[in-house]
Amino acid sequence: MLLFMKLSPSSSSCSPCSLFRFILLFTITVLIVCGKTRAVVKLPPNVSVPAVLVFGDSIMDTGNNNNNLATTARCNYPPYGKDFKGGIPTGRFSNGKVPSDLIVEELGIKEFLPPFVDSNLEAGELATGVCFASGGAGYDPLTAQSSLTISLSGQLDLFREYVGKLKGVVGEERSKFILKNTLYIVVLGSNDISNTYFLTRVRQLQYPDFSAYADFMLSSASIFLKEIYGEGARRIAVFSVPPLGYLPSQRTIGGGIQRNVVVKINDAVRIFNAKLSKQLDSLNQNFQDSKIVYIDVYNPLLDIIVNYQKYGYKVGDRGCCGTGTIEVVLLCNRFTPLCPNDLEYVFWDSFHPTESVYKKLISPVIAKYLNKFL
């Protein structure tokens, strides 16, 4: 762990004190530089993205649910993480890295994005970003309440705690620079639509028309975006909801005996995404100096799923874990048989893609959208 100390000047030991300051600062600088990875994308001169901060659900979660024994939305056990560095299950809902990691790696910031609630989080990580995402969360407060995970408002509280700690580490002025130039990423909505609306149908009683529920989700998203803007966020990427009707679990639950694509869920996703894109355009006009960008992952992921063979995969409708039709979190465990080669599968479990798919998805997305933030 990096050591940050407040050094008091002393007239009797000025030279040793100055030498110690130099050694300490030099050591910190070396550790930070060595911790960086080589950037895949090249930023324009005088443009900086010092950190990435992520809010979201299990697509982005890097381990924030690990110590939450009240929820089943945990995966800090085998076979999750089997292809991660050291083969360690870290709480990432995949066989390896998740988009949070791949984004900071593409930007050359660091290799992994650590979870903020990790008790072993090093102070030196704060200046380059952390992850607040929690598997099971959504825009709808009821979604996280049902899964006993960190709600969007809870993630906002963690962010505010992070800001306080960041100021303590790097100071007020450097904190302002980091917060202004950080890339903020928001990835939510999948659990709201697939679970809270269609699976449990809890919200269908209140919103029989999905379009009205989508408006409710958007209201929550807008309030959140205004809050982080007020805390200094200016570069904000908001991901679309992926094509949920094609996920193995959704096909098993709602696709009949043939496990067909669930059209009504996909239609709902498209309705929400269209509204989200329009809402972000409106917020951009109202938030001075902000760059809030809608990131379409629906279409590129859909292309990988539908045309999986073109991308080098052999299976596109089942996950690698177990039968691949329903296994996720607790049902995908150390006793569950795995496919021989997860590189041949689009999905790792019945809900989450493999690291291989994430890599094919994230790199083009960054190349397409990064300039919109600069």
Image: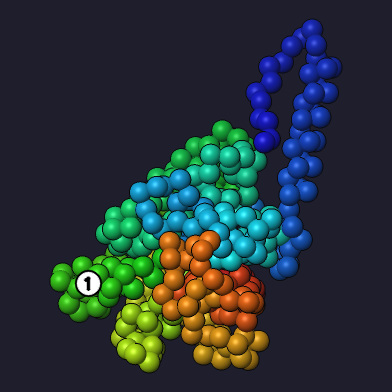
* Crowd tier of the residue under label 1, counting other residues whose Cα lies within 10 Å: few below 14, some 14–19, many 20 or above: some
- Who is closer to the viewer here, 93 or 79? 79
Q: Is residue 245 visible?
A: yes
Q: Secondary structure at mark 1?
A: loop
The percent coordinates of residue 144 (x first, y second) are 33, 57
The percent coordinates of residue 14 (x first, y second) are 80, 14
- Who is closer to the viewer here, 51 or 254? 254
- What residue lies at 69% left-to-right and 55% top-to-bottom? 86
- In the rendered view of the protein, which quadrant contains the C terminus? bottom right
Q: Is residue 285 visible?
A: no
- What residue lies at 39% left-to-right and 70% top-to-bottom? 190
- Which image quarter: residue 366? bottom right
Residue matched to label 1 = 201
The percent coordinates of residue 101 (x first, y second) are 61, 60
- Who is closer to the viewer here, 85 or 302? 85
- What residue lies at 62% left-to-right and 81% top-to-bottom? 344
With 192 as the anchor, is 291 left or right in this view?
Answer: right
- Who is closer to the viewer here, 145 or 178? 145
- What residue lies at 81% left-to-right and 29% top-to-bottom? 23
